[in-house]
Image (cartoon, grey):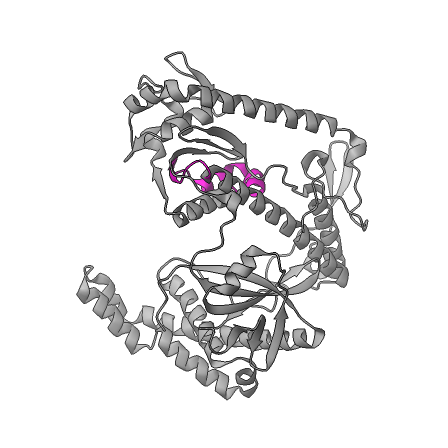
Amino acid sequence: MKKSKTPSFITEIQLKVSNQQERELIARFQAGRQLYNACLNESMARMELLKSSQAYQAAKKLPKGKHRDEAFKQARRAYRYSEYDLHYYVTLTATRSNWISQKVDSNTQQKLATRAFKASEKVLFGLAKSVRYKVPTRFRSMEGKSNKSGIRWKSNQIVWGKLAIDGIIPDNDCVIQHGLISTIKYVRILWRELNGKRRWYAQLICQGQPFSKPQNYVSSGTLGIDLNVSNVAFVADSHAGLLPFAEGVPTFEREIKAIQRKMERSRRTSNPDNYNPDLLCKKGNKTVKKKGTIKKGRRKWNQSKNYQKLARKKRELEHRKTSYAKSQNRRLANEILRHGKDIKTENVSVKGWQKRYGKAISAKSPSFFMSELTRKAESAKGSVIKFSTQKTALSQTHLDGSRMKKSLSQRIHQDATGVVMHRDLFSAFLARYVDRDMLSLHSAQVEWERLEPTLMEAWEQYKQYASRVGTSESRKSDPSSECISIDSDNRSQIAIKGRKATSIA
């Protein structure tokens, strides 16, 4: 089946699942998981035979062109390493195992085979080091090939063989209603763990464009973007801003650390043979007991019910933190796109930031923000142009063309022409006038007089925001406000330095 080239979007609908239906779904997912692992194992075996064959090694030495491509095809054909060969294998495997063929339909079987083949192909092309075989907690979704047979959506229900499950469809949800009236290409069923419970969802992969909320309109115009660890500066044709990522995001740092300590104590109690003996060591004038380290080698770990309960609590806190950060960053991307959709920005390495800043990147997610901004801009028929940081050096460039290095802590740009501006806002302003890794200084000089009041206003708003946040944090630094109880039913969501965040579902 050829891949569709028409635009697609996903409509997600929660399912109303009874206990009996959930047992059946879990059984079908167990069958699908075993079938996927079997396909993945077979695909990897064929891939290893292919890589070690003389035909494949000879094809690698050929120059790029038609002859090389044909040689690779012949080698693949000889070792039956293709998506359709794996489709034949999965049908044979499911038929031999009678219970799997009863639980998983043929279309879903083939999609599982395709999924396994693509995973092994990533290893073949060097895009991944290894594949992951799925355990029950990691196998979370299955999908069909079309909405005509297998897993399909019909009459506000997900229908899978004899199983029919109603969807929870709010009457006033325009996003879901838009998806339901669109053409459905195929359907995916998945589960998530929320608040310690398994929730089931149907994802309808629909043809066309997603619903656009009236307040999330996109304007035409050029935007200069300067991406940082904790904020983003943008300069449009008549507007500018220096906005924080994931404003007020609850990190749950202290709660997670407390849970991790409880988990470690539980694990040591349940697995005493996996640790070396405790040691007595000198710390100044005192003799203190140091806990034994984990023994080397592969070992079996027993998990108590209390450990599993704590692990679920930890996963829930991490899920809330991630969901809040994503929601805030999507809202920030929508705010920026209201002022323009043709984006120019430096090609910064967020992976380098991860090594240097660690937790700050985790809490703010600048890479996710940039990917969302790019996706939304391109969806609105805009453009995203990334240019070299080394060639342009916007943070060092002055309006007269000279360059002067700054330390990272120096956030104010004092231009050689006498201009004083926030470093990030000035870099975003210059980004508007970069074309093919070359900065047009003349255009920047001409436009500066017009945009200077706009940039000054944005800087003043940022100062007021920073002042408010600083005052708020100083008020909440009282130790009495930092006392929390993890075991309490009404657990407050505490961010770093005791900041209380609003609850999110």
Residue 353 image point, x, y percent: 48, 38
**Residue pushed farthest top?**
418
**Left or right side of 324 for 481:** right
Q: Is residue 422 visible?
A: no
**Left or right side of 469 for 105:** left
Viewer-proximal residue among 419 and 443: 443
Query: Which residues are the magenta region?
Result: 338-366
Name the residue located 36 percent from the left edge and 31 percent from the top edge: 432
Q: Is residue 453 positioned above or below 77 on the image? A: above
Residue 241 image point, x, y percent: 49, 29
Q: Is residue 378 positioned above or below 33 on the image? A: above
Viewer-proximal residue among 212 and 24: 212
Q: Is residue 277 positioned above or below 104 on the image? A: above
**Left or right side of 234 for 256:** right
Q: Is residue 331 visible?
A: yes
Q: Quadrant of residue 502?
A: top right
**Per the image, is 30 magenta?**
no
Q: Quadrant of residue 245?
A: top right
Residue 219 image point, x, y percent: 42, 39
Viewer-proximal residue among 149 and 428: 149
Residue 198 image point, x, y percent: 67, 64
The quadrant the N terminus occupies is bottom left
**Per the image, is 352 magenta?**
yes
Viewer-proximal residue among 275 and 476: 476
Q: Is residue 437 positioned above or below 404 on the image? A: below
Q: How many marks?
A: 0
